[in-house]
Each structure stands twice: as C-alpha cells, then as structure tokens.
Image: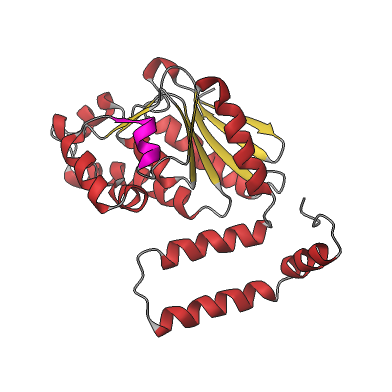
Amino acid sequence: MILDIQQRGAAAWLWMNRPEARNALSDELLAALETALDVLEKDAGARVLVLAGRGPAFCAGGDLAKMEKAAKMTKARSRREASRFAKLLYRLHVYPKPIVARVHGPAFAGGMGLVAACDLVAAADEAEFALPETRIGLVPAMISPYLLRSLGAAQARRYMLTGERLAASEAKRIGFVHECVPMSELDAAVERLCARLAQGGPEALARTKKLLAHVTGAPLTPALAAETAAALAEARSSAEAREGIRSFLEKRKPGWQ
C-alpha cells in the first residue's frame, strides 16, 4: 500500500509508504494523496489530517528516474507533468481541514515543499530540510510560493540558492517548524497539536484557512478591512458560531467536541 491511512481519534494520519525510495514523489503516490484528500474532505470524523512518512525519510522529493524521463519529453508534456504536483501543493494549502506535517527524517526538495504547504509542522530533532535543486541544474519552482510564505523571503532566498541543509532546531528558530522534539516524543507532539486543532469548529477552521490565504501578503487597505469585517459577520451568523457562543456561556463543550 503506497499510502497507509490510519484514524487516530479526530485525526487521519496519511503515511507515505515508499520507504525503499525514501518516499519519493512518484505518479502513484501523488495519485494516492489526491484520492485520499478527496475522500477525507467528506469524512466528518476526520477533523485534522497528519502527513507522515514511513522509513528513514519523510520525503526525498521528486522521483529522479521520472525526472530523467521528463527531460526527454516535449515541453508541453513536461509542463503537464509538473502541474500535477503544483495542483497537489495548492490543494494542501487551501484544504478546508488543518494539516500537520510530521517530519521524522529528511524532507528534501519537493518533500520540503509538502511540509511548507501544510499548516503546522512538528519535527524530530534529527529531521533535516534542504532544497538541493540548483545543485543538479533544477529549480525549486512549484514549491517556491509556499517556501516564501513559510520561511520568509530572506531565508527562502538563502536556502533555495545555496541548497545547504537546514537542521530541525534551526528550522524552528526561524519559524519554519512549530514543534521540535526528540524522536521518542514526536507522535505525542503531533497528537497534542491535533487535539488542539480539533477543539475548533470545523466551519471556523475552514473559514480561517481561507482567510489566511486571502490576507497573507495583502496590502492593508480599506477594502481589506471591509472584507475581514464581512468574513466575521458571515461566521457570526452561522449555526456553528451560535452553538459555540452558547456552549461558552453555558460552560460546556460545543457539539463538535
């Protein structure tokens, strides 16, 4: 099974399962991730998703054998091949449910892009990140928008150009990683994040992800102020908000918990 899905409480854990290939992003793995995202979006029991990897690596990035073949394709076909990964990254970024990346080992190239497209990142102390594309004549193209958002422009410029490795502890210091713990504590750290996320209303979480995507990098204008006010007004009128406010005043848990 190239993608192993486990339900742990309110979280669905998606384990990339190509350990012999360090979870390189084959067409089959991309297809399995696409299908899982479609299915789990409709699953009310899966409030949070966790993206993880089996074997020694989280994800080594693109499948180089596939890239070698792509180099011999027409430009139009090569563009279509690349677009598939670009669409998956965007799907992760705007997915209506929170996604936590569980990084236990190397997350290189496209693997680091997967991490950047997730909402929260928990990494083991020994995890490493790198963008080695320029060292083999490639460009970290599709992952660049997510790297700029998660690393910031200055750090993204450094790691995209140099290809140097980024240790988990340094990744946490610069804000790319949210939790950095010993390997023995990684699952517990992920489960804590999932539990906190599951306390939020499903609609509120989806609305907040949409809001983040819209306001990140947006200029501070009267139009943006009006849009954010409209977003709150729309949320405030929802049944979920009414239940949440009522449960708070009545000192009880809301129905979604």
Q: Is residue 169 magenta?
A: yes
Q: Is residue 1 magenta?
A: no
Residue at the (86%, 64%) spot, across then down: 250
In this rendering, position of residue 223 left or right of residue 247: left
Evaluate whether residue 4 shows in this view. no
Picture coordinates of residue 211, whole percent (x, y): 50, 65
Give the quarter of the figure containing the N terminus: top right
Residue at the (67%, 56%) spot, across then down: 202
Magenta stretch in the rendered image: 166-173
Question: Can you say whether 152 is above or below 191 in the image?
Answer: below
Picture coordinates of residue 94, whole percent (x, y): 48, 55
Residue at the (51%, 30%) spot, across then down: 52
Could you say which quadrant of the image residue 186 lies in? top right
Question: Can you say whether 130 is above or below 161 in the image?
Answer: above
Outermost residue, front side: 173
Q: Nearer the viewer, residue 247 or 75?
A: 247
Question: Can you say whether 139 is above or below 243 in the image?
Answer: above
In this rendering, position of residue 255 left or right of residue 227: right
Could you say which quadrant of the image residue 217 lies in? bottom left
